[in-house]
Image (tube, rainbow, N blue to C red):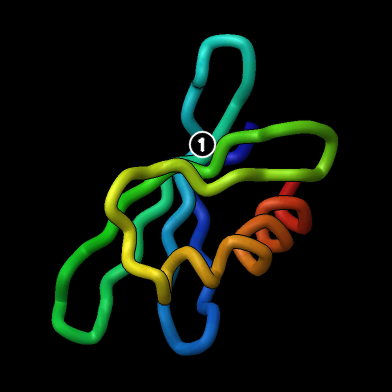
Amino acid sequence: MSNLFHKIIQGKKFNFQPINLGHDTGYHVDVEDEEGTRWEFTMEPEDEGHWKLKSEKLPLWLKAFEDELQSVINQHE
């Protein structure tokens, strides 16, 4: 499993760190918004090549990145 990696998506730097979810490996992801607030969440595998953004109380703009985040993880693996 690789270590921490970063990806710029629409001008925002997303940081990805692999995490052990027990039976699977997921990613802890964090990104900073324009006001300097750091948002943290996990991307968890659902099935082959599909990842789901998991967290409570994320802003809608961040949830809109789910497909792009999924693509970044698939390209990295």
Split into 4 quadrants, where in the image is the C terminus?
A: top right
The quadrant in which residue 52 appears is top right
| Residue 66 x %, y % | 58, 61
The quadrant in which residue 32 appears is bottom left
Answer above or below: position of 59 versus 30: below
| Residue 42 x %, y % | 45, 42
Which residue occupies 52% across, 87% down?
10
Indicate left or right for 23 with 35 as reference: right
Indicate left or right for 52 with 63 as reference: right
Which residue occupies 81% across, 43% down?
49
Split into 4 quadrants, where in the image is the N terminus?
A: top right
Answer above or below: position of 1 versus 21: below
Q: Which residue is mark 1?
A: 18
Which residue occupies 34% across, 66% down?
31
Indicate left or right for 53 with 56 as reference: right
Answer above or below: position of 64 versus 58: below
User: What crowding class fits label 1: few (fewer than 14 Cα within 10 Å), some (14-19), or many (20 or more)?
Assistant: some
42 or 2, nearer to the observer:
42
| Residue 53 x %, y % | 52, 48
| Residue 71 x %, y % | 73, 61
| Mark 1 residue type | Pro
Count of numbered circles in the view:
1
